[in-house]
Amino acid sequence: MPKTNVDLLQGTLDLLVLKTLSWGPAHGYAVARWIQQLTGEVLQVGEGSLYPALHRLEERGWVEAEWRLSEHNRRAKFYRLTAKGRQQLRVETTAWDQFVDAVGKVLRATGQPA
Amino acid sequence: MTGAPKWLRWSRLLPSDVRGEVDDELAFHLDMRTRDLVAAGMAPAAAREEAERQFGELRRIRDACVTIDERRQRRTHRTEVMTDMLQDLRLAARTLRRSPGFTATAVACIALGIGVTTTIFSAVNAILLRPLPYPRADELVAVYAQNPDRGIYGANVSWPDYASWRDESRALAALGMWTWTSLAVGGGAGEVERVEGSEVTANLFPLLGVRPVLGRAFSAGDQTPGRDRVALLSYGLWQRRFGGDRGVVGRSVQVDGLPYTVVGVMPPRFNFPQRGQLWVPFTVDQNAQERANRMYAGAIGRLKPGVTVEQARADLAAVSARLQREYPGDNFGWAAEVIPLRDDLVGDLRRPLLVFLGAVAFVLLIACANVANLMLARGATRQREVAIRVAIGAGRGRLVRQIMTESVLIAALGGALGVLLARYGVRLIALAFPDDVPFYISLHVDGATLLFAALTAGLTGVLFGVLPALRSTRLDVAASLRDGARDAGSSVARSRVRSALVVAEIALSLVLMAGAALLLRSYQALQGTDLGFEERGILSVRISLPLAKYPARATRAEFYDRLFERVRAMPGVQVVGSAQGIPFSGWNVQAELSVEGRPAPAAGQELDAHYQWITPDFFKAIGVPLERGRGFTAADRDSTSPVAIVNETLARRVFGGEDPIGRRMRIGGAGSSDPWATIVGVARDYRHYRLSEPMGPAIYFPYAAVPLLQQTLAIRTSLADPLALAPAVRAAIRELDPDVPAYEVQTFEQAVSRSLWRQRLQGQVLGTFALLALALAAVGLYGVVAYAVAQRTRELGVRMALGATRRDVVSLVLGQGARLTLAGVAIGAVASLALTRLLASLLYGVRATDPATLAGVSAVLAGVALAATYVPARRAARVDPLVAMRSE
């Protein structure tokens, strides 16, 4: 499969992060790895740009952070989705679905509308 | 919130290490990535490089994260502080609502305290603090003539002296001259009216820094006789008479019957002096060129920048000394007197205002002591609540802050109410002020006053809150919880503090009451002073004929004789007399007199006397009897060898035991060319200037010999209200000459009462404060004793069970109140003796250390205090021993 460089919209990155965290608390490196694995490395996110996104989400109260020991026994900052964040994830997922649906309809159309 | 562990609360207040945390987080990422790459087979160094490449711009990302985190932290901190404060406020509001009696009493005390303080401050601000409405007003000085050897201060300045001071002074940037006058103005809308005004030198308004809004100011040329018929109008006069017509400049108006050209209009809210509305140029006639003629005018100067008043005094003293050497005859003993202009305008208002300010500070202190006492009493009953909160982890600082929040809330409520009270109080004070205070004094609650009230309220809240807050949070938690609601170990210390507060309140009240009593007794003494004339049933009306229209004595006499005749014919009129200035009118003209056959007195020993030209019926009209000789008759009209009447003081001082009748005196010193006047009568002394001041020597000449332009009619009437005559008298004057307005139409009683306004105001204001203080102190004493009784219920029960009678109990409680009262009165008496000295210059007929006054107010205070103690004493006596001993 050829690797495509897709520039992610900021809102899209936020959505991916929220989704990732909905499985449970994780530190930034884990979030980055999951996103890469799941997208089959199609989306070559500059790994660093993940962090401002995480901190912004924390500022908005969608995620909470806590320092804990990681699986390798090192202090790491773990992020956890808040109730507000879970709500936000639902809203954004719906919006994304509608967006994809709408764009898809246009792309699959067979003729020019009257 | 109080349940949170202490270390966590503190850690939130410290700025956490945002940068360090971001660095750690990003380092962790890079390390993990490197480790995974090494695990996949890369060399460590290459792996590190690859990790950094994949990460992107490390520095930019790190900065972005730090910015976001710092913003978040600032916001959190802010909301936390706000939340704490809001929580304290809500808790305080709830606590206060739960004890409405306490809250109402405390707020009322503070409202009274702040109300009176703010009222007086607004007066002090208006009169003493607010700058005069001139640019760089602190450079302005009033300059008068003084002759300390003869006890003369604030005297008018002669023109030649003025010119010398102006030209030779190195301290003054400018010196202007003015003289008070009243002018009949006609033209524009309405009848001819008499307005206060002034003759001013051309440089006076420029040196004050005031320019006309319309037209031009006076020029030096306007002061030349013959070219001086020009006038400046006040803004108010322009609006009133000319409807604000901008075409008024260049128009002609009637001033004292002569046509004057309006050259300009002065800005709004400018009057000079005091309330003057019309200005004409100061001109110097032959008479005013004499150096010894100190008849008319005052001077106002502006100091050069950086020059002090002291320097100006020294500077003008040097010039005066030179003038004395050069003109020993005219200037012996005379020098310049330099006073900051504000002091000159404010004059004798300063001391009473400062006394008032001191008095309100006392009232406020008493109010604070009262509220502190209430809070201490409450603190005692709240110990259990405080102990519980300490037990569950509330720090002392937090508790102190919370109790302080309550006091600040009380102070804020009291302050708001106090400002409302002050608005009312300021209106009362403004009513008491006469209408001749300087124009720039306007009494109202302004921004500065509100700021003052807010600051005072804040300070008050801290003042009465801090002691109770510290006291009621200092306690032994375990003991308090174990002992239940009862006040435990600290009760002795606490009641000692409360007793001290009450003693202080009583002492402060006594000082205030002593001061008020002294001022009220002075006012009474003034009112009881024998005026020497009859003030009831007399209407006075002032008239000034314009010189231009009445240059000849014959025409003046014709006008006045016809007027006297008409007024005499009016129903209800008994006697009509006339002089230049009636008592309490402010007429104050003195001249040096010489006695026939006596050598000229030594320099500084001259005889100065008050003099007037009076009609035959003047003394009869105002009820002053002749002690010897005869009064004037219509036949006394010879001006070449006139007759005269002197008063008792002059007769005694000049002639001693000899009979003055038949002796001759004349106006002027050794070189006088006035005719000798033969004394035909001696009139009894009466008060002419003010109640507190005997008249001094006076001499009277017959009106018919020299009918002056200016007369003040004294009309004795049988009508209940002399003012009822006023319309008829005005009409009679208008019929004789419509260009001559009547003014200062008032009854003698009004004139006398007006002259006492300051003493009345002083007595009333301080009296009010003293009553407030007394009431507050009584409430405070009652509170302390009642609380002590409540605390001792059990002990009293035991005593009664052991055989103490109700009488014993009452005297036990009364004894406690009496001890506090006595201590307060003793301290207060000593303080009064020290402080009432400050009042000495405001007193009349009573000494500042008058023992009777002090004893009287002490007795009243003690009586009220005893009454305040008696109520709880009675309650104590009604205690049922059984119930009391069972109660816990």
Image (tube, helix red, strand yellow):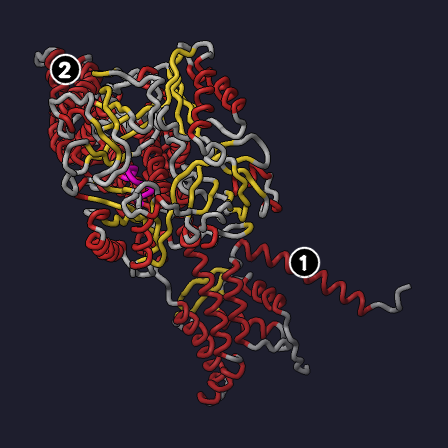
**Residue type for callout 2:** Val
Q: In front here: B246 or B701?
A: B701
Q: In front here: B428 or A102?
A: B428
- Name the residue that disc number 2 marks: B810
Q: Vertical placement of B13 versus B468: above or below? A: below
> Mark 1 or 2, which is nearer the eye?
2
Q: In front here: B513 or B649?
A: B649
Q: Which residues are magenta?
A: B343-350
Mark 2 belongs to which subunit?
Answer: B
| Image quadrant in which the C terminus of chain B is located | top left
Q: Vertical placement of B109 versus A29: above or below? A: above
* Secondary structure found at label 1: helix
- Residue B651 included in the magenta stretch of the image: no
Q: Quadrant of residue B442?
A: top left
Examine the rendering and report whether any part of residue B379 can be seen.
no
Mark 1 belongs to which subunit?
Answer: A
Q: CA distance from mark 1 to mark 2?
A: 84 Å
**Residue type for callout 1:** Thr
Examine the rendering and report whether any part of residue B412 can be seen.
yes
Q: Are marks 1 and 2 on the same chain?
A: no
* Secondary structure found at label 2: helix
Whole-percent x, y for residue B691 in the image: 26, 25
Query: Counting other residues with Cα less than 10 Å from the Cα at mark 1, is it few (<14), some (14-19), or many (20 or more)?
Result: few
Question: Going by the image, does A23 lie left or right of B862?
Answer: right
Contact between labelled residues 2 and 1, with CB atoms less than 8 Å apart: no
Query: Counting other residues with Cα less than 10 Å from the Cα at mark 2, is it few (<14), some (14-19), or many (20 or more)?
Result: many
